Image: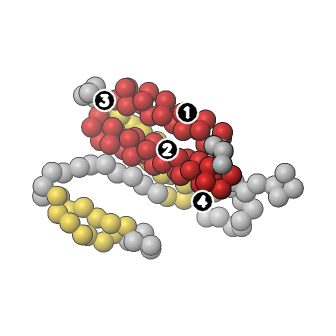
Amino acid sequence: MMLISNINKNLSIMPFIFAPEPKTISVMITMSEKRKSVDEKLTLNLIRGEFTAGEAVDLLSELFQSKIDFHVAQNFSHEERLGVAKSEAIQRIMELKNAKKESLDLVKGSGKKFRIHSNVIIEPLNQNA
């Protein structure tokens, strides 16, 4: 049995359940360097690891679906408030669905391991723009 953990607000590990099958999906969140001010770019390592085809399918499916759901909710809110679809959200939904299909087609049933990396870069925008 493998212990599955939950990460609390302080990024410490808290055990909460035992699972019969071991999984080795590791999703790491680390800061590349300490941020000094809100005006500086922040880079976070969201995903870094090696994954079986099944793990890659799970990880990529959840990641893409989360972003798709975000834009669906944005579009719904826009339609409710203004009575028209939000074209940017509709376009992004289509792009994400295509990327999801392409990535899953690559890994699904391949029997291979994959190295997956994903960074999140947060940059403040010029307020005058």
| CB atoms of marks 3 and 4 within 8 Å | no
Q: Position of residue 64 (x, y in %)?
A: 45, 42
Q: CA distance from mark 3 to mark 2?
A: 20 Å
Q: Report the side of 79 relative to 7 (left or right).
A: right
- Badge 1 crowding class, 10 Å Cα cut-off, few under 14, some 14 to 19, many 20 or more, is few
Q: Which residue is disc 1 drawn over? A: 95
Depth check: 78 or 111 in front? 78
The residue type indicated by label 4 comes to Glu
Q: Which residue is disc 3 drawn over? A: 108
Q: Nearer the viewer, mark 3 or mark 4?
A: 3
Residue 71 visible: yes
Q: CA distance from mark 1 to mark 3?
A: 20 Å
Question: Which badge, 3 or 2, is on the more N-terminal residue?
Answer: 2
Q: CA distance from mark 3 to mark 4?
A: 35 Å
Q: Where is the N terminus found, in terms of image quarters?
A: bottom left
Question: Against 13, is 48 above or below?
Answer: above
Q: Nearer the viewer, mark 4 or mark 2?
A: 2
Q: Which residue is disc 4 drawn over? A: 33
Q: For the point 63% across and 43% down, which residue is it?
A: 85
Q: For the point 44% across and 74% down, which residue is it?
A: 10
Q: Secondary structure at mark 3?
A: loop
Q: Secondary structure at mark 1?
A: helix
